[in-house]
Image (cartoon, rainbow, N blue to C red):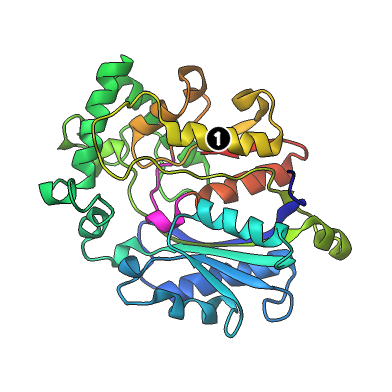
Amino acid sequence: MKWPAVGIVGVGAAGFRRAVPELSTRELMFQAASRAYEDAGVDPRKDVGSFVTTSEDLWEGWSITDEMVPDQIGGAGRPVCTIPGDAITGLGNAVMQVASGAAQVVVLEAHSKAADVVDVEAVESLAQEPSLVRPLGMSSDTLAALEMGLFFTKSGLGIEDCDSVIGRSRKAGAKNPRASFGSRSARGDAGDTGMISSPLRRVDKAPHADAAVVMVLASSEWARKKQKEIVTVDGVSWNSSLPWFDGGETTAVGYARDSFERAAKQAGLRRGLDSLDLLEVDDTYSFKLLQHLPQDDTKQGSFVIERLLPHQTGQRIFIVLIGIRLNNAGKSVGFI
C-alpha cells in the first residue's frame, strides 16, 4: 500500500570536522536544530508534533542519554522518541509517524561527537555478538580485514579497485565545501598510510567526524497549506545481517539488496539503480562500496570519506541529496 506523501521541509547541520572542541554535544545539536527550524520556517514549540533522535547511552558517556536530548532541540515536555540505531532507521520511524497521522510535522535529530570518546574501539566491540565473537578479543577492524580478504578471494577484485574508490571519493570531497575530509591525492594525509590488519589499510577506513544534523519532515498536505517546498521521501528501508561473523557469503550482501528492493518497490523504481540520477553510498571501509554496488555502478559511486558514530550513519548524505534535489527539480536520488 502506498503511504501518504511525506517529505523533508527543512534541514540544518553543524560541525562536520575531525573535532569540534569549542562546542559541547548539546551546543552542536542546538546549532543544527536552530538552522533546521529557520530553513523550514517552523516554531518547534508550536508546529512540531513529535521529535525523533538517534542516540545511544554508551556513546554519550552517561546513562539514559535521551534525558539530555529534548531541551536543545525544542522538545522539552513534548513527545520524544529515541531510536538506538542509525539515522536511516530514524528516518523510517519519522516517516511512519507522519504517514500514520500521528503527527503532521516530525523532527529527526542525529549527532556524532566521536572526538570526545576516550576509547571508540572499546565501545564498537560491544556491538559484536557477545557469546561467540566478542570473547575472541578481535576488534571490528580485524573482523573487517578478514571479510575484506575473503571478498577479494571470491570476487576477483583487489587493492587496486579500492584505490580507485578512495581516489574518486577524496577528489569529490575536495570539491565539496561540506566535506570534513578531502584531498586531491588518492592517499590523502600522510597519517592515512600504514596497515591496520592485512589487507585493511588505514587509508581504507573513513575517519570519524564530529557533527549534528536535524531534519524537519512533514506531510505533503501540511507543506501545501503552508506553501513550503518539500523533498519527498519516496521509499525507505533498513535491514541487518546476522549478528555474528561466520565467514559467510561476502559477494552477496543480502541486507543491502533486500533493503534496496523494498525501498525501490515503495518508490516505484522499475529499473532499479538505473532509475536514479545520483547514488550516494555511506560505508566505513572502501571495499564495502565494491560489495554493495555492481561493478559498473562503482564508477558512479563514492564511499563517504568521513565517518560518523553509528547512530548518525547516513545523515550527512541527506544534506547532499537534499541540496541536489532542490537545485535540480525532478531528479531522483538514492543512497545506501
Q: Residue furthest bottom?
A: 77
In the rendered structure, the answer to whether residue 21 lies left or right of residue 146 reads right
Q: Main secondary structure of the magenta part?
A: loop
Would you identify the image quadrant in which residue 229 lies?
Answer: bottom right
In magenta segment, residue 96: no
Between 151 and 211, which is closer to the camera in this rendering?
Answer: 151
In the rendered structure, the answer to whether residue 20 lies left or right of residue 299 reads left
From the top left corner, tell me how far across and down residue 233 is, in percent. 68, 47
Pointer 1 residue: 260
Would you identify the image quadrant in which residue 151 lies?
Answer: top left
Residue in the picture at 65% in, 43% down: 235
From the top left corner, tell me how far across and down residue 173 is, in percent. 47, 41
Between 66 and 210, which is closer to the camera in this rendering?
Answer: 66
Q: Residue furthest top?
A: 156
Residue in the picture at 53% in, 79% down: 70
Residue in the picture at 15% in, 46% down: 138
In the rendered structure, the answer to whether residue 98 lies left or right of residue 287 reads right
From the top left corner, tell me how far across and down residue 200 is, in percent. 22, 33
Q: Residue furthest left?
A: 136
Q: Is residue 302 visible?
A: no
Magenta-drawn segment: 304-313
The secondary structure type at the circle numbered 1 is helix
Three-letter code, disc 1: Phe
From the top left corner, tell me how far across and down residue 198 is, in percent. 16, 31
